[in-house]
Amino acid sequence: MITGDNKDKRMHFLEMEVVRLNNLLASRDGYVSFLEDELKSAEGERARELALKDEFIAEQSETISRLRREKDAAREEVADARKELDEARAVILSLQGQILESDADKIRLEKDNENQQKLTELASKAKMDFKDIVSLLQNRIFNTNSDRTRYLNGAIDLNDPLISEMGFEAIIQEVLRQTDEIIGQEENGAGKGEEDDEKARPQKRPKTKKSQVGISKKRHVFTREILQRLGMDTSNLPEGSKLIHRKDKASGEDVWTVELIHYQGPKTLRTVQEIGRFNVPKSDPMCSKHPESIIQGNPVMPSLASFYLNSKFGYSLSESRIIEMLTESGADIPQSTLNKWMHEIMTLMRERLQSRMLEVIKLSYFTQNDEVRVLVRSRKDKDSDFEYHVEYIHGCLSPEMKMVVMLYDEGTRGHSVPEEMIFRDSNIKCFIADRLSAYATIVKDLEEYNLVRACCYFHGRHYLCDAYVSDSRALPAINLINALFLVDKQAKDENMDRWQRLKLRLKYSEPIVRKLFKLLHQMKANIDDYGSLMRRAINYMLDDEKGFKAFLTDGAIELSNNAAERMFRHIAMGRRNWLHIGSHTAAQNVAFMYSLYESCRLNNINFGKYLNDILTRMMKCDTDYVAMLPCNYVAQEHEDELKVKECA
């Protein structure tokens, strides 16, 4: 129960609380009014700022419009100025052209006068008349000279005193036999008029009327097998016609045959074989037998591989052209995929055959060596980018073993590749090569092998023939070199061995060589009297006189290195089609494939059939790789890969 005092206290407390709440409410109302005033002030400032910004934007817009108008006006002024400048340039160019034409005419006249003075000096030194000068000018303009070509092909001028002094009965007879027509033309052409020239020309044989019946058996001989023999088709004859019988024929019937030749286009086929996995009692699961293939996982069979490789290396076709041919025959294979498959097959053959080919080369007594350049995509180190570099393939040909080996070792042209892989630990006693310093280094490094290095007379004669175009004083040296080739040709015609050929050389070639270098030394003593081409030819032979005389020490040494030059011909032809090689590994495969191709050519083997045969042998796990080398190769017949009987 609440007492009176408590009620009073309670009321007083409540009154005080009401006062406090009223005061609090009043303060809150004051704060709200303060905030309202602040908001109004902020809105006013915001409005003023927006107004200022609008004014600024308007000013900037007006400025931009003004600048645009000024820019357009400036563009028009620039266009007018450029037009005027182009017109001025055209006038200047026209004037400059007229000046250049006048200067060119002046320079041309001065150059012509200078050339005439040089030609006159050259003619006086070379003892040439005006007719020879005209011939020289024609050769320089049209790049042809019949005498140069004739001497480069081995012709000899018998009127040369250096030849007539020597008593080579056999050489003279051989020269007369080979150059009888040329000498006859020269003798008949001297001191004769046009009528005599007409009489001296060989008379044409009268044309005989060709037979209209059948085909001449002597002129048209075909070795293809006969697919089908057909009887006579008498559908064009009227009823009652009878076959004519003649007494002068063995059978008595007037019958002959007409041959027709057909071509069955290439066709690419595909076989699909199912492989199953089987549970084997008391063993792990096993798969059924996989079909035979060259490399498991590589679907290319020997027939397709031989077609591709023969087309690329035998016929020098580009890969895009081979792809087109395969597409036309029904095989649509991406180029990158086909390239990968083929390089796998080439790598397989290289790993199995190249070492055996090197063993055969090392058994040789004499080799011919050279190198050729190719463009290979490679990089110097792992961090550098791929670039195309000119690299070199080394080649070695053994006429004795009928084998060619081409080696590539990251493109180096140094002596290490042929020295370590061909000459070291070999039976090779002598070789011929160009004058690359690497071959002299090989002889020096392998001094204990007593290697004999010979130089190529064809290169020396080539330089002399180039000089002969402008200086006829090179002719005696050319005749002497051609006489050397005639001596070797006589030895070849008589099938002489190396001992007989050496004996023939010592009898006939040694005096020629002695006179040749005596003549070159005389020219060297008066080297200032000769032009640059003659100097190059003289120095080329005298700088390596020992190498040019090496063939007189051994009958196995050839006079020229042309055979080694020819073995690189297909690489040079291929460069025009495939242009470059993609990697060092690909270059090794390319070098190996050309080794196989050139070796097949030496042994008269069909390259495509050879590849198909040896790949089939490898596919059938034949490990007699020595028998697969071209020098030991004997063809084998295999069942058809597809086991499909073809019907004509």
Image: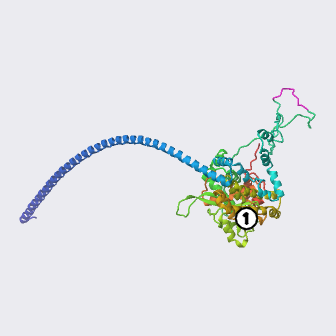
User: Residue 389: where, in percent of width, then height?
Assistant: 58, 59
Depth check, front residue: 137 or 245: 137
In the displayed structure image, the side of residue 10 where residue 407 appears, left or right: right
User: Residue 448: where, in percent of width, then height?
Assistant: 72, 73
Q: Amino acid at mark 1?
A: Phe
Quadrant that contains the C terminus: top right
Q: Residue furthest top?
A: 239
User: Residue 563: where, in percent of width, then height?
Assistant: 73, 57
Q: Quadrant of residue 508?
A: bottom right
The residue to which callout 1 is attached is: 431
> What is the count of numbered marks?
1
In the displayed structure image, the side of residue 120 where residue 67 appears, left or right: left
Residue 621 shown in magenta: no
User: Residue 134: where, in percent of width, then height?
Assistant: 66, 47
Depth check, front residue: 641 or 22: 641
Depth check, front residue: 204 or 233: 204
Q: Residue furthest right?
A: 247
Depth check, front residue: 645 or 599: 599
Residue 238 shown in magenta: yes
Q: Is residue 392 visible?
A: yes
Q: How are the colours assigned in the image?
A: rainbow
Q: Secondary structure at mark 1?
A: strand
Over which residues does the magenta segment extend?
236-245
Q: Is residue 633 visible?
A: no
